[in-house]
């Protein structure tokens, strides 16, 4: 079986208690993979309802894009060309990284802090490579409809006890009525000690408890500095994946593209 998973993400992350103090993180990832019966279980996105997982993910790239490690652990071994092309208001290359079938790009720029917008149309295309031929797929972004009700910027969250997150909103018609909760904590601005976690649960529940066994895997959160602003190197966010759009290409049995819009805060895991 050959399979591709393309994912677009937009995260609105507030790191101070002022609404204007926000960090926007837009990025795109894609994998093109060939699976054997023993690796077919790696073709996934998100995690099963009711489960939480955590993985160490050191390095600055993980600080930008570490949730990718938790959502797609595919072999990424099929060459689909040197770069993909993303269009959502303007063209953006998504180049190949780390081997034959993995593609990744940060989409923000100095002139426009956001590239993806809720409800905006987008398309991803590729001219093809050694293993996968040309393709094009289009979709429309979802909405950032899930909001925390008991988490705010710079909040302290214990690492030695379970923590129950509460939210409002959620669309029962997307992601099988589930929400995706994610976060990470870095010990310092080198990001050499960084652990991500991701949990999933029903949107209708309005709450989800992160087990102490997950939180205890995180390093104590350090601080970063931007001008006069000190901010935590811990983050907690929530959102819902859009229902995927399917596509195909020569050399590919199937592929999906999906997007997710996160809301979140900078927090201290202590």
Image (tube, grey):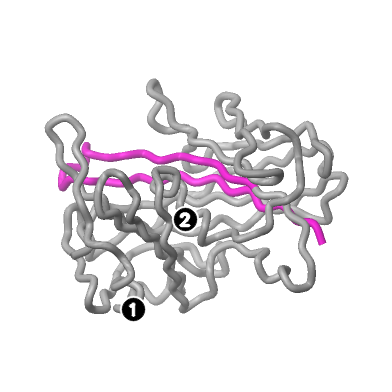
Q: Nearer the viewer, residue 58 or 32?
A: 58
Circle 2 SS class: helix
Q: Which residue lies at the image location 45% right of the left edge and 71% below the top edge?
A: 53
Q: Which residue lies at the image location 60% right of the left edge and 34% below the top edge?
A: 94
Circle 1 SS class: helix
Residue 229: in magenta span: no
Q: Position of residue 86 (x, y in %)?
A: 62, 33
Residue hosting label 2: 67
Q: Quadrant of the C terminus?
A: bottom left
Question: Can you see residue 193?
Answer: yes
Above-or-below relation of 114 to 119: above
User: Does label 2 or label 1 sit earlier along the sequence?
Assistant: 2
Q: Most extreme residue toward the top, as rendered?
A: 111
Q: Position of residue 30 (x, y in %)?
A: 63, 46
**Circle 2 Cα neighbour tier, 10 Å, few/some/many (<14 / 14–19 / ≥20):** many
Q: Is residue 258 left or right of residue 204?
A: right
Residue hosting label 1: 213
Q: Position of residue 169 (x, y in %)?
A: 38, 62
Q: Nearer the viewer, residue 102 or 183?
A: 102
Q: Most extreme residue toward the left, as rendered?
A: 228
Q: How many marks?
A: 2
Above-or-below relation of 75 to 250: below
Residue segment shown in magenta: 1-30
Q: Main secondary structure of the magenta part?
A: strand
Above-or-below relation of 108 to 47: above
Q: Which residue lies at the image location 33% right of the left edge and 55% below the top edge?
A: 193
Above-or-below relation of 49 to 221: below
Q: Position of residue 77 (x, y in %)?
A: 73, 51
Q: Which residue lies at the image location 73% right of the left edge and 54% below the top edge?
A: 33
**Circle 1 Cα neighbour tier, 10 Å, few/some/many (<14 / 14–19 / ≥20):** some
């Amino acid at each position: 079986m050959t399979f591709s998973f393309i994912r677009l993400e937009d995260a609105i992350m507030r790191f101070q208690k002022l609404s204007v103090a926000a960090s926007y993180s837009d990025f795109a990832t894609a994998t093109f993979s060939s699976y054997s019966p023993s690796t077919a279980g790696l073709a996934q996105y998100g995690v099963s309802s009711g489960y939480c997982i955590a993985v160490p993910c050191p390095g600055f790239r993980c600080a930008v894009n570490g949730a990718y490690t938790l959502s797609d652990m595919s072999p990424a071994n099929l060459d689909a060309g040197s770069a993909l092309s993303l269009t959502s208001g303007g063209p953006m290359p998504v180049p190949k990284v780390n081997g034959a079938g993995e593609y990744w790009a940060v989409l923000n720029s100095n002139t426009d802090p956001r590239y993806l917008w809720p409800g905006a149309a987008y398309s991803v295309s590729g001219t093809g490579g050694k293993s996968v031929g040309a393709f094009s797929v289009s979709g429309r972004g979802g909405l950032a409809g899930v909001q925390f009700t008991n988490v705010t910027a710079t909040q302290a969250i214990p690492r030695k006890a379970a923590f129950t997150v509460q939210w409002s909103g959620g669309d029962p018609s997307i992601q099988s009525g589930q929400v995706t909760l994610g976060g990470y904590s870095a010990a310092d601005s080198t990001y050499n000690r960084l652990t991500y976690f991701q949990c999933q649960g029903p949107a209708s529940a309005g709450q989800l408890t992160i087990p102490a066994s997950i939180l205890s895997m995180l390093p104590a959160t350090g601080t970063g500095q931007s001008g006069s602003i000190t901010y935590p190197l811990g983050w907690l966010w929530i959102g819902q994946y859009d229902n995927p759009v399917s596509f195909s290409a020569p050399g590919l049995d199937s592929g999906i593209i999906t997007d997710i819009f996160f809301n979140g805060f900078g927090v201290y895991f202590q």
